[in-house]
Amino acid sequence: MKVIIGLVAKHKEIDKKRTFVYIPDEIKNALYKNNAIAIGIVPSMKNIIIVDQANQVDIYNNLENLFTQQEKQNMIAQINLCDGIILSGGSSSDAYEMWVAKYCYNNDIPILGICAGHSNMIRGIGGKSKKVANPEIHNQPDVDYVHSIKIDKSSNFYNFVNVENMKVNSRHKNTIDTINNLTVAAYDVYGNIEVTEDKTKRCFLGMRFHPESLYLKDKLHNQIFKKFIDICKKDT
């Protein structure tokens, strides 16, 4: 039986009357390449979008009150179809992504967060993100390798890639500020947090970079998806 990974869809405004939800092709394709099944987690929740850093704590404090019980149950029913969950990157975030991260954390469901998805995992358990210094360095969408990261050899993430240094891409304007109960697994060369995790969970792992953009050419980045799928496979 193949592992089923749920990709949480994000809202995108097409015009003032219509919104769509979308899922990145690169993440979907990386999962299929590694013999998993990708399905969309499509919320019935309204698109309550986090647009800046100032309101993230207020959203966290009111997270359970933002959605109806039926909206939560609809999301839980979809999550329960999956062996693991991925929160993707993007230029904005929906508050329900934080709710999903919190639900997975509390129920020990394997979850992987990429870029904005990483921020939403942090926010979902009470941490905060912030604007990164020198965004022109960190927001380079057309460059494969922007800088390297230093990985803590005692971290769970080290077991994903089995190296202490690896080259990564970078296309983000925010970084991690506070991480609550999580552990830093890797920093970039500028001292910013690149990877966080919770060692007490099966997999609660978030990263700033985008392995889905490099998995076809870099085995270390592909190994992140392979290892995540293997962890999800244990209970299938």
Image (cartoon, rainbow, N blue to C red):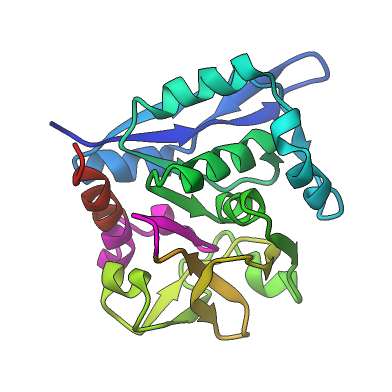
Whether residue 42 sits left or right of residue 54 in the image: it is: left
Q: Position of residue 164 (x, y in %)?
A: 35, 84
Q: With respect to residue 214, does 148 lie above or below?
A: below
Query: Magenta span has 212?
Result: yes
Residue 87 can be seen, yes or no: no
Say which quarter of the image contains residue 216. Answer: bottom left
Q: Is residue 88 above or below residue 223?
A: above
Residue 71: say if magenta. no
In which quarter of the view is residue 66 placed? Answer: top right
Which part of the image, by quadrant, shows the C terminus?
A: top left
Q: In the image, 82: left or right of 129?
A: left
- From this viewpoint, is residue 112 visible? yes
Q: Nearer the viewer, residue 124 or 187?
A: 124
For image coordinates 58% across by 59% down, the residue present is 141
Query: Magenta span covers which residues?
Result: 200-224
Q: Position of residue 155 (x, y in %)?
A: 37, 76
